[in-house]
Image: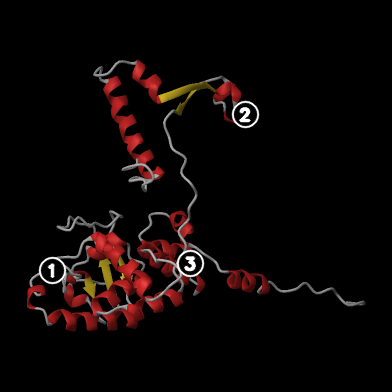
Amino acid sequence: MSSGPGSKPVRGPRRVNAVLAAVREFLKYAVSSGAAPAWVIDQLYEMGDSRDLPAEVRGEYGIPRGCAKVRHRLHEPDDPVDRASDEEIVALVRACRSARDRLIVLLMARAGIRRGELVGLRRADLHFVLDARPLGCPIPGSHLHIVRRDNTNRAWAKSRSSRAVPADSLLIQAHDQYIIERAGIAAAAVSDFLLVNLFRGHIGAPIRLGAINELMTSLSRRARLERHIRPHQGRHGFADNIMAAGGQLDELAELLGHASPLSSQPYLHPSHQRLREAVERVPSPRLPRQGE
């Protein structure tokens, strides 16, 4: 897990557990096909007995059954992702030194786009027009499409299903300023990717995933924030703002690209003020007067 004593772990507990799960499935297949001895299963699982469980979960007719417990698994600490506040997003935008960087911040904070979806955007995915029907798109109003595809910069959308996210005037203005900035660099005209290198590296090439983290860290330091804002915190801020503005959970799930509204619940971060307002909206009971 570590590259040396005292160094930061290369992989976190969640990633290690995912690798262990894949290895277990491989070894289970090897045992079932006869390529590995049966005792390998005993090294992977600790066999127990359901007689120690409550009667309600022992199975049909209460007959004891064997149960398997994974032997090798790391504890995954509960470390929820906090949202980026509106004040922090404004500070990040002000710290940007290019129209491209401003667009990157706003795409995460105003459209809730994941880092991989962001750097995988193509210019044809943006329908910033009032009527996109001439483009073969029936969705009304300005919007952008999130499409899962193979990209040369190894970026890809997490969800297999495509989705359309409405774009507000702030996002459209940031995009227009970036297009003007990009038009001044001839090497950037060839690429179909929306976000490309403009100032260093291979000019015109699509930006890589790690560049988004580096940008957010640099902007957080330049804006003199008390903490470094991570890309996913912009997405959390977008989700929380949608719900604070009266959005419904099914609407949020569609905007975030979640198959189930339950997947959107970790993105909700009600502030103390919102909780107080929720309580104050409940009317006070009135005692009936004498004779009523």
Residue type beneath disc 1 = Asp
The furthest residue to the right: 290
User: 178 above or below 120?
Assistant: below
Residue 67 in the image, given as x and y percentages of width and height: 49, 24
User: Disc 3 vs disc 2: which is toward the camera?
Assistant: 2
The quadrant in which the N terminus is found is top left
The quadrant in which the C terminus is found is bottom right
Q: Earlier in the sequence, mark 1 or mark 3?
A: 1
Q: Are marks 3 and 2 in contact (CB under 8 Å)?
A: no
Q: Earlier in the sequence, mark 3 or mark 2?
A: 2
The local crowd at label 1, few if under 14, some if 14 to 19, many if 20 or more residues have their Cα within 10 Å, is some
Measure how far apart labels 1 and 2 are at the Cα level.
59 Å
Question: Would you name the residue on which mark 2 appears?
Answer: 54
Question: Would you name the residue on which mark 1 appears?
Answer: 192
Measure how far apart labels 1 and 3 are at the Cα level.
35 Å
Q: How many marks?
A: 3
Q: Earlier in the sequence, mark 1 or mark 2?
A: 2
